[in-house]
Amino acid sequence: MKRTVFNEDHEAFRAVIRDFIANEVVPHFPDWEDAGLPPRDLFRKLGALGVMGFDIPEQYGGPGESGYKYQAVLNEECARAGVMLGHFGVSTSIVLPYLLHLANDEQKQRWLPGIASGDIMLCVAMTEPGTGSDLAGIRTTATLSEDGTHYVLNGSKTFITGALNSELCVVAARTSPATAEDRRAGLSLLVVPTDSAGFAFGRKLQKIGLRSSDTNELSFTDVRVPVENLLGEEGRGFAYLGQNLVRERLAIGVEAVARARAAIDFTQAYVRERQVFGKSVASFQNSKFVLAECETEVTAAQALCDRALDLEETGELTAADAARVKLHGTETAGRVIDKCLQLHGGYGYILEYPIARMYADIRVNRIYGGTSEVMKGIIAKDMGL
């Protein structure tokens, strides 16, 4: 089905990104998976390409307002090649918007030029060992010093993506106790340099997928955070975290559909080449029917994503719409990639084939950014249920 969501500028950008991935990523990607993260210099190369600072104003070294569609193109090209750029998406499409929307002029001058160049990478620390989707249960504390010059940060976080390759971490912490009337009260966002005294990296968690991106435990022991690093207003952290969830969930849905599309492409190539009983696997009716089902599912999911991309660009994408995109996109990708792996037979279980990595990588999309169950709750509420 013909797509109309991208214009000539987007397609020109696609060509540049495709060349970069072919030359700078694909040859080295197996090494990144073995190491558990890409080299830090990757992000400086992306910065030189001009893609580390989407929407950063030109005065701070960025391209100015660009829109999320360029990031969607980049996600599609990574999926097409069967690779990932470490925690690039976390830094650029999930964490950076917090700074763009909440940082004051002094903070923007201090941080944004380095982000645009790739010298500063970002991660976000929300999840705690006992707190996942229920962010109101955050226990990490940030206590204001008696002289009012800094916060003292104590606590721990887990499932933090990209921390080892980041210079700044946006930490959600409790600056005052919750109230009986509002469990969400008292949370604030602090921008914490990862080389701060008392900022410690715990275990590097071993995941079944996304092995080219590090995921870590973090701990904070009397970390001094200058009050100048408070992002936005004290006590409004929960509301701030909710503001960027629309973009985050759109990104997860878009990426999932892009990887499902790539899975079909990889599988078509495989079944045409693979011979069984003297003929190609593609010649069997079951192969044709399965791929026809996958193609139809992904085309429908793509149409939903493309419509959401248009709405996001005009500021009309709602939280419920983003939940629909994430729910449908990730659930569709899970089904489609599973079917594509089955058509590979035993080779589908071997990691040298892209479909095996996709199968492991895609599973978490139904968990992070809000589980499928949370998405269903948001959609049901929007329906008045």
Image (cartoon, rainbow, N blue to C red):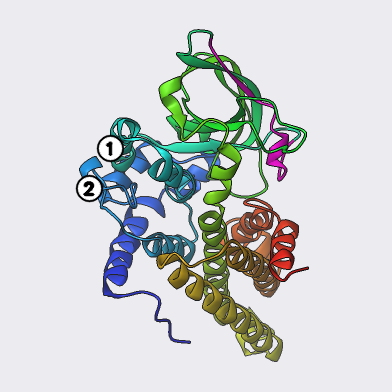
Give the structural element (helix, strand or loop) at label 2.
helix
> Is 140 a magenta residue?
yes
Spot occupied by residue 172 in the image (x, y as percentages of width and height) = 58, 33
Q: Is residue 316 above or below residue 286?
A: above
Say few, some or many: other residues with alpha carbon within 10 Å of mark 1 (under 14 / 14 to 19 / 20 or more). many
Say few, some or many: other residues with alpha carbon within 10 Å of mark 2 (under 14 / 14 to 19 / 20 or more). few
Given residues 339 and 183, the one toward you in this image is 183
The stretch in magenta equals 131-145
Given residues 259 and 231, the one toward you in this image is 231
Q: Residue 331's quadrant in the figure?
A: bottom right
Image disc number at residue 350: none
Q: How many marks?
A: 2
Marks 1/2 in contact by CB < 8 Å: the verdict is no
Q: Residue 108's quadrant in the figure?
A: top left
Residue at image mark 1 = 113
Name which residue type carries label 2: Glu
- Identify which residue is drawn at 74% across, 69% down: 384
- Identify which residue is drawn at 39% across, 65% down: 69
Mark pair 1, 2: CA separation: 9 Å
Q: Is residue 356 above or below residue 157?
A: below
Give the structural element (helix, strand or loop) at label 1.
helix
Along the horizontal axis of the image, is 303 left or right of 363?
left
Given residues 336 and 170, the one toward you in this image is 170
- Identify which residue is drawn at 48% across, 56% down: 83
Name which residue type carries label 1: Pro
Q: Is residue 209 above or below residue 125?
A: below
- Farthest-out residue, left: 59
> Is 37 a magenta residue?
no
Spot occupied by residue 251 in the image (x, y as percentages of width and height) = 51, 59
Residue at image mark 2 = 58
